[in-house]
Image (cartoon, rainbow, N blue to C red):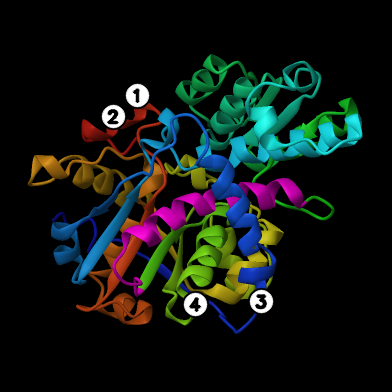
Amino acid sequence: MSNVFADAALRYAAGSPQTGTAAFSVLSPTDFSAAWDEITAWSGYAPTPLVSLEALASEAGVARIDYKHEGPRFGLGSFKALGGAYAAMRVLQRELSARLGTEVALADIREGKYADDCAKIVLVSATDGNHGRSLAWGCKNVGAPCRIYIHAEVSEGRAEAMRDLGAEVIRIDGDYDASVGLAREEAEANGWFVVSDTSWEGYSEPPRDVMAGYGVMTREACDALEQAPTHVFLQGGVGGLAASVAAALRQYWKEDSPRVVVVEPELAACLFESAKSQKPVAVHIEEETIMAGLSCGEPSEMAWEILAEEARDFVTIPDSIVAPTVRLLAMPENPTDKIEAGESAVAGLAAVLAAGKDTEMAQSLGLGPTSRVLLIGSEGVTDPDIFARIMAGENA
């Protein structure tokens, strides 16, 4: 294996996990169950693979690595398909129920009974790519208009994928957090509805629905495992994925729930800094990371409630180990083990491989020969041009 992992400079911050109720109260078992019942009824639903990475587990010095590969999810290429589209339906359900004065069922929205009414409700969001694609797909399925705000560094390939699903895409000059701000501002001015994966004061229902949708992925993984993992390495971003998975694992495995390690780009480490301050902290992103889906400077307050109780470790990784990790998955010794993954998908695996070359970091994370690690491979190839450059040897 390349020395790039041995040379990687990982940063570590200890969390302050504690006995609490956030994993059951912020996201309740009922929230997860409702999302499961709806999403598994969608056309094209199928569980995504849980793949054992035996050779890479050996390289990392752990007993096993199980990788939940979200590339095939609904043909959209990422786990976000579970969140944005489900949250969109829940926003429409609440608004239609209020407008029509009667309780509207998700099944009736899904089956087109309220298509004319949905066409009058505009849904908007900011995105680095995958969340917006999910929202655009969900809106297309039920006939609702969709506006997606993207920042300057979102690739044109990802923008075009959203346009192909019928979304109006608005590109701004600023970063992700600036696009979030503009989406909120224009929604408030025009009577549109924000479907965001991050929460703020007074705005919590759609982010909760987004995270509840992600629970489908976690339940599939848990049902496929013979025993609880000892560790789960989770991508950071605003914290929605990490918080959802941590809560669902706690609800499923109870006291056997795995040790939660949050992994972020060193260029966008808002959760890492929040752990150090023991409160949500925003950071200014001065340079964009290759992991576009994780380029977030401000944590979700709702997600932080869960992570403050459940996450034991916070780690940042340099961009230098991302492309090599993508190539390792795509070019294994056994061709039948090939996994084509996007840049944000491999954050957890990159951290495990680098920690395996750093005795002190491995000890800090409690990693060793009996460790069983669960990873969320959050996306497949969502931008073919970037993937092609990585496979050609570039760091994109």
First reached walking from the N terminus: tag 3 or tag 4: 3
Which residue is disc 2 drawn over? 389
Q: Residue at x 37, y 77 (%)?
A: 365
Place of residue 23 in the rendered image (x, y in percent of width and height, measured from the top left): 61, 70
Check residue 385 in the rendering and tell me which mark sits there, or answer none: 1
CA separation in Å, label 1 and label 2: 6 Å
First reached walking from the N terminus: tag 1 or tag 4: 4
Amino acid type of the residue tagged 3 in the rendering: Thr
Which residue is disc 4 drawn over? 254
Left or right, residue 138 beside residue 349? right
First reached walking from the N terminus: tag 1 or tag 3: 3
Give the mark toward the camera: 3 or 4.
4
Asked whether 282 or 370 is in front, the reply is: 370
Give the mark toward the camera: 1 or 4.
4
Helix, strand, or loop for circle 4?
Answer: helix
Helix, strand, or loop for circle 1?
Answer: helix
Above or below: residue 301 compared with residue 98: below
Quarter of the image with the C terminus is top left
Residue 211 part of the magenta-drawn span: yes
Which residue is disc 3 drawn over? 21
Above or below: residue 85 compared with residue 66: above
Magenta span of residues: 204-230
Check residue 201 in the rendering and tell me which mark sits there, or answer none: none
